[in-house]
Image: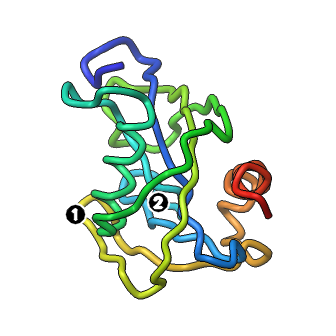
Amino acid sequence: MWKQGPPAHLTASALVFNSSLDKVLLTLHAKAGMWLQFGGHFEPGDASVLAAATREAREESGIAELELHPELVHLDRHALLAAGFGRCSEHLDLRYAGVAHDEQAYAVSEESLDVAWWPVDGLPHASADEIGPLADAARRVLGA
């Protein structure tokens, strides 16, 4: 669970939708160099996986009041091919979803190069294979 652990790390993330569930708020991840959902490693104060995903989504989106749906929406295992991840070579990611009720209430964090809304049917090309299945699973849980 911790960055100091073995090369495969358990992580928590969240895909944030607008109210109509037709757009997702993504971060241009500084280390990966692509548009992704918000998320990252666990910290000692995280009481649960949902709490870790919520903390990461709030920190990286700048949406302090963001609440995530309590049901896990997606599981993913992916190798980290980009440099800059240190000893971490693989993430075992537990994924949640939430809704931002104000599309203007977000900010770019220190961990991101940018944050922007993307239409679910017009995701960034390099991220579509990653975000598309997650968005489909999340919208089923969120009731779309």
- Whether residues under marks 1 and 2 lie with C-beta atoms below 8 angstroms apart, the answer is no
Which residue is found at the position 20% from the left and 25% from the top? Answer: 44
Q: Which mark is residue 96?
A: none
Expressed as whole percent of the image width and height from the top left, the position of residue 112 reads 33, 64
For label 2, the residue is 33
- In the image, taking residue 37 as reference, residue 87 lies left or right, namely left
Quarter of the figure with residue 105: bottom left
Amino acid carrying label 2: it is Gly
Expressed as whole percent of the image width and height from the top left, the position of residue 68 reads 49, 51
Amino acid carrying label 1: it is Glu
Q: Quick one: label 2, few (<14), some, or many (20+) residues within 10 Å?
A: few
- In the image, taking residue 18 as reference, residue 109 lies left or right, namely left
* The C terminus sits in image quarter: bottom right
How much space separates mark 1 and mark 2, taking CA atoms?
14 Å
- In the image, taking residue 88 as reference, residue 116 lies left or right, namely right
Expressed as whole percent of the image width and height from the top left, the position of residue 51 reads 36, 37
For label 1, the residue is 110
Identify the secondary structure beneath mark 2.
loop
